[in-house]
Amino acid sequence: MGKILEQAGAAPAEKAKESPNLRTQLLKWKTEEEAGLERLNRYSDSGQLPEGIDSIDISTRRRIFDQALLAITRHLLILDVIQGSKDTLKELEAAAAAWKGFDTPPPYSVLMVDELLEKKEAVEGKQASNRSSAHVYTTTLDGLLKESKAVEEQIAALSKPDANDAASQWKLETAKAKQRAYFIRASSLKYSLSSLEYLIASGSVEISLLNRKIKEAGDNLSFTSEDMDRIKSASADRQAALRKELANVRKRLGKIHDEKVSAAAALTKARENPEPVPGSIELAELNVETAVLEADSLQALSDFLDSFVLIEAFVPEAYESRFELLTPKSPENRKHALETLTAMYAQLDALDVVAKNELAAVAADVGKQQSRLSLVSADDPKLPLLSRQRTVLWEKQAIVQRAHQSIVNQRRTLSRWIADYRAKEEAPWYMPVTEAFSKGWDALNRLWNISVNSYEETIEIDGQKVAQMRFVSLGDIITAVVLFVIAYLIAAMISRRVQRILIHRRLIGEAQARTLRNWLMLLVAFLLAFATLSWLSIPITIFAFLAGALAIGVGFGTQTIIKNFISGIILLFERKVRVGDIIEVDGINGVVSEINTRSSIVRGFNGIENLIPNSLFLENRVVNWTLNSRLLRRELTVGVVYGSPAQSVIDFLNDAAARHGLILKDPAPFAVMSNFGATLVEFTLYFWIELNDKTNSLVVASDLRIMIEKGLTELGVSLHPPLLEAEEARRRAADTPTSSAKLSLP
């Protein structure tokens, strides 16, 4: 079942294929789940529960059965739906392949383009919703897989031979039922994902087809007076229908006012009755409340229908303005039409805020009314009045939603019209680019010619020496920097190539080659700087102001720099510390990753890179764990209770070390009885590992502990209880410098 569930949780891109036996299996499981639920109900009614099972366990299994039945019902429904999704995709693909153009010749009405655009927006909305649902389903499926693994572990634990009591069997059956429910839900989710993928693919095909139609119609667009007449006629029909609906609401409003008066009179009479019927006053008050609520709601309906008529009245006016935009008339007319559409958009924006607020308020009223109804029984005389209140609130909510949706549609349409017009009326793309380029070029020229410094130059004219002023501009400095960088990059590329050749031919070590290259590039940088300045006729004297600061810096920093440089050279030639060595220096443990001219980089085992001045390697004590060998001896101490077979423990420890793939066979591992404690006998296992990027001594030790704990338990050897503090301190003090307590090595 676990493998099946993992298959059910495969990647969503892999389409689910219905097995011919899946539907039969689901129906079989449905019968079994229903039978199990019926047996559980009988078992619960008898009141005879196994020892260790309570009502919570009964409720848990009943909930699992209910979830499984619900998942089966959904799964069967999805199996029917997914075929429809496949057929829809095939039909759309066939329609897209068959469409070669409209049946009628151009030009095409602007109304047809608007209809195509609205249909495209609707499909894009569905696409976004389907993608969001697919993401939720994928996340839920991942969660089911994790929960299923936990259930598998629970089943394995309950399936042990010693767990054969009634309570354990009950829990085992519950865990298996839960595992089946997880599989059904996971399979259902996978088929749902496949159905969504078909729907998303169908949406993509439909959007592509709509884009083709919109482009072809948009390239041959027309807006005629006949189109305008159709718009006005359709708008007039909608306004007439709204006015008719408004008349009916006002007629109902008149009747409800009469009912409100009658209800108020009935309430007054009930209160004046010296011996009122129990509950009559409360019912009369509710009747008045209902009449008032209905009157207020109908008045709100009337107001929103008025607003609805106003919104519909915008349509012809908006299309007239659009007609002005699309008609090649004077710029003044088009400007006026654009201002009209912008003003309409602002009005709709304000109406949208009002509609949203009213929609939130009526939703709160509906929720409050639902809460009141949930507390009323079916035979309560207040139920019809409360239901009537809820009905009128629903009616109000519906008309507000209609108005809000109409506002949203109109705003979206106006926004599209305004954006399309502005896009067409904008100047060609190269005009603003040209203007911006011209302005930028002028500003760049002014910046380029800014004088940074000046100097006096002596030239010879007709045999006479004449002094003249020369200026160094910012452009000269930038040119010098660019030339320097280009030349330096070329030199660096050549030096890297030479470095690889020297290392490949084993003429020089990698660390030495890197250091030599660094110093050569420093020399090249100085030579390139002088050559660049000379080629541009920029005298070095203009940088005289830097000489003082440079001299001061050299005076303070040369001593340390030279010391570290010489230390680096000694390190490279003595090769007592090499790249890749595992060292301990100045309290830092790690691997040497670089040895440079001034400092070296030691990458700690926590991933942090430390810059160590080279002089520290000569002045401080350095522990090099891999100077002559990368082998490292580790030890692991195990305490067992007195009476345990010592030789068996030693043999098992040797065998465990021999079976570990990362422990070296030469030198061979060995175990000894190391100490008699107050409450335990200590055995120590000594083994060797090779320090490299694939071996982590902490993981190796952890693996050994797991193997030892499991193996000794199987041998019947009991591990010691927690060590006494004195023994713990003695053991730590007896650890060798190569123990894990001394240094955390990989």
Image (cartoon, rainbow, N blue to C red):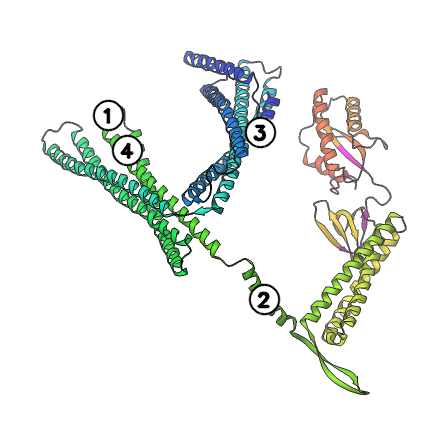
- Amino acid carrying label 2: it is Ser
Tag 2 secondary structure: helix
Frontmost residue, 65 versus 205: 205
- What residue is disc 2 on? 438
Q: Amino acid at mark 1?
A: Asp
Q: Are marks 2 and 1 in contact (CB under 8 Å)?
A: no
Q: Image quarter for residue 550?
A: bottom right
Q: Position of residue 480 (x, y in %)?
A: 73, 68
Q: Image quadrant of residue 526?
A: bottom right
> Disc 4 designates what residue?
390
**Residues shaded magenta:** 612-636
Q: Which element carries disc 3, helix, strand or loop?
A: helix
Q: Quadrant of the C terminus?
A: top right
Give the answer, above or below, for where 291 lies relative to 476: above
Residue under pointer 3: 146
User: 404 left or right of 691?
Assistant: left
Which of the two discs, 4 and 1, labels the residue nearer the N terminus?
Answer: 1
Residue denoted by label 1:
380
